[in-house]
Image (tube, helix red, strand yellow):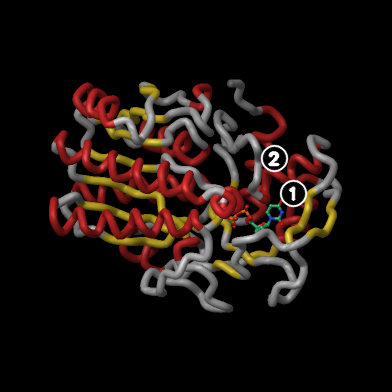
């Protein structure tokens, strides 16, 4: 039995990772405190409820399963919330990751695949961001993830904890079988909010800012399909398992789309109107985040072929019409 510990396995990306791990022959053990995740989303392996800051509970779980590696998704991830209450992010994300790494080392687990973010780069006007770009986060969410990256670097040098760090761009879409999907409460992400506006679950989508220095005035992001993203994690696990060195990879396609372009594509993909209102900028938002994606493609052999706007929105729409989770 080859167990992999999946922190945040009850969340959007973590649950999709569990499905991909199971398909690749691993047994995903979800470790999640359900603060934003859903027990209903844990369908592909055992569930152990617990908090990342709870060392005793982590020790129990490590000793019960003896996992070969950790996929560490568990984190708070809302830019806006992180600006209002940064302490939450330093406590949950940074302190929680420290406790997790200490528990892993005590248990002899020396491989971690970590979910980081392009928000660690900050605002670099009109530059394509590759893994060597300087990291100057402009919000507390990005700062918390950068601090964890630094910690992983130190823990490798001093304790031999090997890492693959993935810096995600904007994740969207859902499982093509619609077994699992994106369901946050409250929802803050663009694609599910557009679908909520289409289906009448909310009155309209508010576009945050139309005066950015971009061709249509709205922010530009690089969207990645969640199934492509989690496939990269299976490759990351194999990378570490085969003894390759710790490495950082961006996960983005290299194509940027504005908020208005995503809305237009949602109209086409669903055949329905999107009610929109125009509002102020959201604090902490960067103008443009687009990935230099060569490293993951060439070194990991990653394939991002599902990551077209049409596919992401179509898969998200299929899930949106049927799927949701209950507390
Ligand atoms: N956005 C928006 N209205 C919303 C939510 C998001 O205009 O209700 C914009 C946001 O300003 C950003 C893009 O959509 O430019 C993606 O935001 P999201 O929260 O999905 O991801 P983030 O880039 O913050 O990780």
Quadrant (top left/top right/bottom left/bottom right) for the N terminus: top left
> Is residue 1 in sight in this rendering?
no
Q: Quadrant of residue 123?
A: bottom right
Residue 28 location in percent, x, y?
A: 34, 30
Determine the residue positioned at 76% across, 55% down: 263
> Is residue 312 in sight in this rendering?
yes
Quadrant (top left/top right/bottom left/bottom right) for the C terminus: top right
Disc 2, SS: helix
Q: Quadrant of ligand 1?
A: bottom right
In the image, 73: left or right of 170? left
Q: In the rendered view, would you say 27 is above or below 119?
A: above
Residue 212 location in percent, x, y?
A: 71, 72
Determine the residue positioned at 28% across, 55% down: 151
Q: Earlier in the sequence, mark 2 or mark 1?
A: 1
Residue position for label 1? 269
Determine the CA span between mark 2 and mark 1. 9 Å
Which numbered mark, 2 or 1, is in the foreground of this view?
2
Dot 2 and dot 1 residues touching (CB under 8 Å): yes
Residue position for label 2? 317
In the image, 248: left or right of 206? left
Crowd class of label 1 (few under 14; some 14 to 19; many from 20; radius 10 Å): some
In the image, 128: left or right of 198? left
């Amino acid at each position: 039995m080859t167990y992999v510990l999946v922190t945040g396995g009850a969340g959007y990306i973590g649950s999709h990772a569990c499905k991909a791990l199971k398909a690749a022959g691993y047994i995903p053990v979800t470790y999640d405190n359900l603060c934003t995740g859903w027990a209903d989303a844990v369908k592909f392996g055992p569930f152990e409820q617990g908090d990342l800051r709870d060392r005793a509970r982590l020790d129990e779980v490590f000793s019960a399963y003896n996992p070969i590696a950790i996929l560490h998704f568990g984190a708070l991830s809302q830019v806006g919330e992180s600006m209002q209450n940064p302490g939450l992010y330093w406590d949950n994300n940074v302190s929680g990751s420290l406790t997790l790494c200490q528990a892993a080392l005590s248990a002899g687990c020396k491989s971690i695949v970590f979910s980081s973010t392009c928000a660690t780069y900050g605002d670099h006007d009109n530059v394509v961001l590759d893994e060597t770009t300087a990291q100057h986060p402009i919000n507390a969410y990005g700062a918390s993830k950068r601090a964890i990256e630094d910690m992983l670097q130190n823990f490798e040098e001093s304790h031999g904890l090997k890492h693959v760090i993935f810096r995600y761009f904007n994740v969207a879409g859902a499982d093509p079988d619609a077994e699992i999907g994106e369901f946050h409460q409250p929802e803050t992400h663009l694609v599910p909010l557009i679908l909520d506006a289409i289906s009448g679950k909310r009155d309209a989508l508010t576009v945050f800012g139309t005066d950015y220095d971009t061709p249509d005035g709205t922010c530009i992001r690089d969207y990645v399909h969640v199934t492509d993203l989690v496939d990269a994690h299976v490759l990351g696990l194999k990378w570490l398992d085969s003894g390759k060195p710790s490495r950082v990879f961006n996960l983005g396609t290299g194509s940027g789309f504005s908020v208005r372009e995503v809305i237009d594509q949602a109209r086409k993909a669903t055949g329905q109107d999107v009610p929109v209102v125009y509002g102020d900028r959201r604090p902490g938002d960067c103008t443009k985040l687009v990935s230099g994606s060569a490293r993951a493609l060439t070194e990991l052999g990653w394939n991002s072929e599902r990551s077209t706007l049409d596919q992401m929105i179509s898969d998200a729409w299929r899930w949106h019409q049927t799927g949701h989770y209950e507390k």
